[in-house]
Image: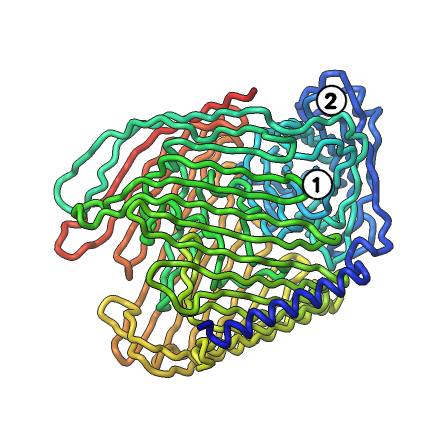
Amino acid sequence: MVHRHSAKVERSVRVLLITALAVAGGGRVDAQTSTREEKTLRALTTSAPIRVDGRLDEPDWLRAEVISDFVQQEPRVGEKITERTEVRVLLDAESIYFGIWCYDSDPSRIIAREFRRDQTRNTAPEDQFDIILDTFHDHRNAYHFGINPLGTQYDAVVTDEGQDVNVEWDERWWAETTRAEDGWRAEIRIPLRALRSRAGTNTFGINFRRFIRRKNETAFWSGWNRDFNFLQVSQAGQLSGMEQARTGLKLRVKPYVLGGFTDPTPGGSPTYRALRDVGIETLKVSLTPGLTAELTVNTDFAQAEVDDAVVNLSRFPLFFPEKREFFLERAGIFEFGLGGRRGGDTERNLQMFFSRRIGLTPDRRPVPILGGAKVTGRTGGFDVGVLNVQTDSYLAPGSTDANEVPGSNYTVFRGKRNVLARSNVGMFLSNRQSSNGDYNRVVGADANFTVFRNTDIQGFIGRSMTPGRDGNDLVGRVKYNWLTDLYEVFVEHLYIGPEFQHDVGFVRRNNIERTDMTGVWEPRPGRFNIRNFVFRGQLVYLTDTKQSLLTREQIFATTTRFQNDDVVRSSVTNTFDRVEAPFEIAPGIIVPAADYHFVDTWVEGEGGGKRPLLGKVRVGGGGFYGGQRRYVRFTPAWRPSRMLSFEPAYEINDVELPQGSFRSHVVNARMNLNLSNRWLTTTLVQYDNTARRSQYYARLNYIYRPGDDIFIVFNQSRERVPGLRGKPDRSLMLKMTYSLDF
């Protein structure tokens, strides 16, 4: 019999979504009904050759329509940009070109230090110019391209107005910049085959943003209202003249070769074995202008960067982000149940699609992937994602055959349909089928509504099917979010049944009902060199499905952001936590089952990004499970030149409990030496004394042409295992890819 609280959640989801649909359908009350005038820019069709060199000296650049009416969002909303900016667009049979003139009254103060691709994002300490390109003109999804004055590229896929941003999407496009006495210029060529659109589209959505770092000034071409950010595609203008554009890649084959050696067995003498492998990194085929199939065979992720070392002082699993290219490309289309614009809460309680469960063990060891296929895009008015991956059997180093993990087939389906102007409804299905007959299946349906311009209402409901788990296996969430530049109100209720299991998702804790209520006030005093304050009050109330209290958090946090982008933050958290079963918080130290009350307080300072030396320092402490905890987190970044940067990160926790005391040290130290934006090196040193683990990772990446790389990777890790000599695992690998486009 379904638990009564499960039925209550299901009824709540249904009532909330029907109400939202009625409201939205009755008045179509969202951003599209505003009186904002939609700006338009026309692309000039050309047959003359365009050389991408950053000089912008071809005659067609002077003939093209020019726009320059950029408006500030920060620091003086609604005022004209302080440095003149011009953009022109050209189009030929194969590519779309952007010509960008970023004039500057003091070009010696232009800030540009970053050579690494995809690092020039919103928080980077750089002057930058960004383009949003909505090729389906659906006011929801887009491609994001960016460039800094050094010519360093940034690209990403934006889904549902920034609810998911896939920075790992890397396409082949060209960009060059030049510096002059009056500023800097950029010339960009994006092949049409790198884009997706629907047949017959003659207008794209488009927006531009310029960021002037020394002034901390952000200016948009369209949609500069502070209630919206740049990734909210509904605020973009229009790019006309695209009638002749033919988008979509016909066929791309990207094979790889790999060689090297590895010594994976802990303890004893070295047992090196050779690494020799070939495979298909990716094979892409355009099924339709808007639908792409992608295959991978004998997949290898040798170049993927290692996870950061972290200390876990809780009794629950930690969330680690996906870093493997095949799973990251177009990953946003598979997202389910994460609607709403609220950000900043890094705790992951439930993620309905978590690709790290495929091809990685819980302790983050790779499982061989024999092959995979993925179809993503749009067809028949639906956004569609289908993923199928087959893994091989796996035996951990040093284990016996009895511990072999059988191979599994993973299938994920996600479909959703846009309704109204900025809303959607959809469904989700996943299946893990083991070769020994074991399986786990999850189904669900969701709806996301944006109404009254600033209001999000979202909900989903689902269930799992797993042999041997026949009880309450329901899961559901409802969310309400009202967000403006000055105020925010956020309410969420999450339900996870005691028998819910998700082998292709992340479940931090089941058998819970979690309610989160947050209010935010962000005044702008306009004096004392302060840009804005943020005052946040939050209540988190977590019970089991029988309404017995497990955790309660009362949080009050403040942020002061200055005009120079320096930030001071503080937080006070009053916690009640019921530990139902003893757990080991550090080697040999057990926290007993009991009810605990404690208060944690921290203060953090963050330096503005325009300086060569920046970063954060957090100092905090308070009660902790019947004892005391003091901690410091130090994450600076020093960029002495455009070629060299140091990013050390250090955290210390000093914990005193009645059962014993311990001190944890975690180091993540990174150095980047980049001779250009084609020759890139990364060195990472990690140390975690609690886990008795250290790691050294070094990677040379030569981008010998856009989209193709040569990697040389050295990786060494050492775990202090009782009874073993502590010999490190190490490997040295060389990998090369070469793409063929047809």
Residue 546 in the figure: left or right of residue 130 = left
- Taking the spot 63% from the left edge, 31% from the top edge, the residue there is 288
Of mark 1 and mark 2, the one earlier in the sequence is: 2
Q: Indicate the amino acid at tag 1.
A: Asp
Q: Quarter of the image holding residue 187?
A: top right
Percent across and percent down for residue 628 are: 36, 78
> What residue is shown with label 1?
134
Q: Is residue 39 visible?
A: yes
Residue 417 in the figure: left or right of residue 392 = right
- For the C terminus, give its image quadrant: top right
Closer to the camera in the image, 668 or 5: 5
- Taking the spot 54% from the left edge, 63% from the top edge, the residue there is 461
Circles 1 and 2 in contact, beta carbons < 8 Å? no
Q: Quarter of the image holding residue 382?
A: top right
> What residue is shown with label 2?
92
In the image, residue 329 sits, relative to residue 47, either above or below, namely below
- Furthest-front residue in view? 1
Q: What distance separates the C-alpha of mark 1 from that of mark 2?
A: 19 Å
Q: Quarter of the image holding residue 539?
A: bottom right
Badge 1 marks a residue whose secondary structure is strand
Badge 2 marks a residue whose secondary structure is loop
